[in-house]
Amino acid sequence: MPTKPFPLDTQQIATIVRAAAADVAANWPLIEGALEARSMGDPLIKIAAIGTVAVETGHTFKPIDEFGDDVYFTRMYEGRADLGNTKKGDGPRYHGRGYIQLTGRANYHTYGEELGFPLERNPELAKTPEVASAVLADYFQSRAVDRSALGKDWESVRRKVNGGLNGWPTFRDVVRRLLAACGDGDRAVPQRNAPRTLVLTSPNMKGTDVIRAQRALIVPDDGEYGPVTAGAVAAWKRAIGYPDNAIDTTLAPQDLRYLLGKDPVPADFLPRAAAREDDLKAAAEIPQAAVAIMESWVGLKERPPGSNKVPALQRLAKDLGLADWYVGMGWPWCAFTVFLAALDVGGSSADLGLRQGTFNPLRCADILAEAQAGASGLRVVPASQAARGDLVLFDWATEPAPADHVGRLTAPASGGTVKTVDGNSGQPNVSVVLAERPLALVRAFVRDT
């Protein structure tokens, strides 16, 4: 069914967003075309895009460079493996550009491959309207921003783009004025008494709606929408057949109705759920298979002593097709060891980290951040549900990092202690050992499926 044409012309848009009419006329048709090319022609999605561009570009309504200079970009982004910035000069070279500030070598590479532009080789292309429009539209679709807009969940739209609510008052004002100009009074920004969307916030959202969701998800019903609950939401969405681009940690009012059984899930969910069933069963077995592999590595030694190189792990890394720099360095590090074992049995989280660079799999703080966001196949699980094979993130509380070490659980925690198999044990020249530590040192239990 054709979507309703967008009723505002470029002059009307320019007046509402307080941008130069010439800039809106030069950029909006490209943005609109990129949205429609991806079947995102609904006026609500276009309103979300206009509001986003107005805020992110400082009302210029044209692709811009991130505010700052090379000194700032070096300080913020140089050496950031989580952004794929692994070469000298990557920080300034791959700073933010476009309508929504594409940042980092990995993102330039990924979007370039996806959209057919040589962005990694020529990052300045990200600031051209044609490329910036395609990046914006692709981001809207891949992060389900369009779905939030269709659900009139404007706060979720802003969070998905910004990661928080920076610029929210301006965005909300632009959206309200666009809605009014479109004559959609019944599509106004929801009032506080409307059913709310549950998202990860700091402090956590609380309420009886959270408790209802937690009981349906079979997680501790403490009434706080934290990482455990949010991760369970993402896992539930995958299991019941949500589209790939709609699997996230957000629980909108309609999602809650599906979860509580008040509405049947859409018919098109069922084939996806059935198609994923075998994959989910196989993924559930990965942690236990990985911990068994790590247990077989106990006692592996560095060769030569003190070199941080473990020949057996280097050979495995090479056999699994990892980058040469992984193989050459040896990496007896704790995080590398747990993910290498998972990759050996086909772990999706390990593949996303070690091969695809979706997150930095060598840094415990990044593993924790991904798990808390329910991203990259990682999610936080409550201590009461932690099982053999789950990751255990420890916090020594001796430095600012929120997590300092990771191992795999060899048995459910009991008696105030946790037993793990670890890499980078701290024992001279020994890379993998069995360990037992106080439960009080555990920052989080994480499932990597």
Image: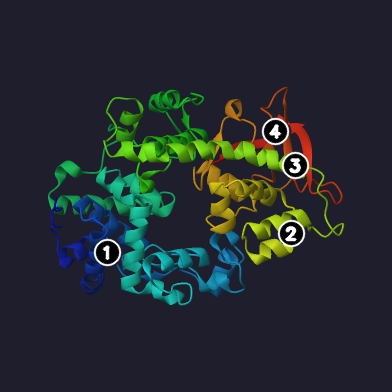
Of labels 2 and 3, earlier in sequence is 3
Of labels 2 and 4, earlier in sequence is 2
**Horizontal placement of 442 versus 61: left or right?**
right
Q: Quadrant of residue 442?
A: top right
- Nearer to us: label 4 or label 3: 3
Q: Which residue is mark 1?
A: 34
- Nearer to us: label 1 or label 3: 3
| Percent position of residue 349, x then y | 55, 48
Considering depth in this image, is 160 or 181 the residue closer to the camera?
A: 160
**Horizontal placement of 364 versus 348: left or right?**
right
Q: Which residue is mark 4?
A: 410
**Horizontal placement of 439 versus 52: left or right?**
right
Mark 4–mark 1 distance (CA, rounded to whole Å): 50 Å
Of labels 1 and 3, earlier in sequence is 1
Mark 2–mark 3 distance (CA, rounded to whole Å): 18 Å
Which amino acid type corresponds to the residue marked 1 in the rendered image? Ala
Considering depth in this image, is 334 or 225 the residue closer to the camera?
A: 334
Label 1 crowd bin: few (<14), some (14–19), many (20+), radius 10 Å: many
Mark 1–mark 3 distance (CA, rounded to whole Å): 52 Å
Residue at x 21% of width, y 44% of height: 188
Disc 3, SS: helix
Q: Which residue is mark 2?
A: 330
Of labels 4 and 3, earlier in sequence is 3
Q: Which residue is mark 3?
A: 296
Disc 1, SS: helix
Of labels 1 and 2, earlier in sequence is 1
The reply to whether the C-beta atoms of the residues labelled 2 and 4 are less than 8 Å apart is: no
Which amino acid type corresponds to the residue marked 3 in the rendered image? Ser
Q: Quadrant of residue 309?
A: bottom right
Of labels 4 and 1, earlier in sequence is 1
